[in-house]
Amino acid sequence: MEFVILKKEKKNRIKNTYKFTVTFMFNDADGYDTIDFLVPEHELKNPAYREELERLIKHFQKCINLDSRGSRGIDDVNEIIKRYSKVDDWKLFCTDPFVWGDEEELDEFEEEYGISEDNLSNIFQYSIPVDGNCGFWYKYDALEAFYYDSNGDEFPVEIKN
């Protein structure tokens, strides 16, 4: 038996970088989706970048805590905003109001909740996954962190507040 390598393929590996993975759950664990944030290690030396990352992590921890208490399915951007606008910095990172809201709603969001595209983070932004079949938003479920060293080897990271 002979084994012939057909094509030499070199994968780019993440190196000297932290990866923060936010897991979202649909319904009662009917499905999951994730969003990754890659943070090069050298960026942590920049105080403004590090502060923004710490705010993002705390924001996700609060959203996960809120959703761990359970909630009904949400299929309307107004309900999403009512639910999460009370979480510190949600309006700084989440783009859903601008993805799903119309012009009239955007004016209401800014007036009632202080949500404005001008206030979004220049470093980190995301949109909550939405189920394509029924239009319900996923819920925040978990946050994991990993570090990739100079060889591209992955190590789990514990986030300590």
Image: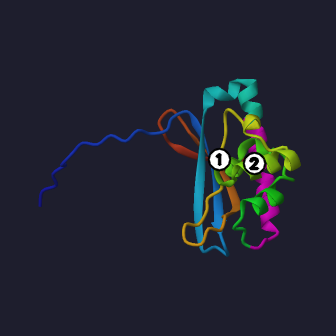
* Residue count near mark 2 (Cα–Cα under 10 Å), binned few <14, some 14–19, many ≥20: some
In reply to whether residue 34 is colored magenta, the answer given is no
Residue appearing at x 75%, y 25% in the figure = 47
Residue 68 within the magenta-colored segment of the rendering: yes
- Circle 1 crowding by C-alpha within 10 Å: few under 14, some 14–19, many from 20: some
Q: Main secondary structure of the magenta part?
A: helix
Front residue of 157/109: it is 109
Marks 1 and 2: which is nearer the front?
2
Residue at image point 78% right, 66% down: 68
What is the three-letter code of the residue carrying label 2? Leu
Q: List x then y, in percent, for residue 80.
A: 76, 60
Residue 31 placement: quadrant? bottom right
Q: Secondary structure at mark 1?
A: loop
Question: Residue drawn 78% across and 64% down?
Answer: 67
Q: Which residue is mark 2?
A: 106
Which residue sits furthest front?
104
Residue 147 against residue 133 in the figure, above or below: above
Q: Which residues are magenta?
A: 53-72
Measure how far apart labels 1 and 2 are at the Cα level.
Answer: 18 Å
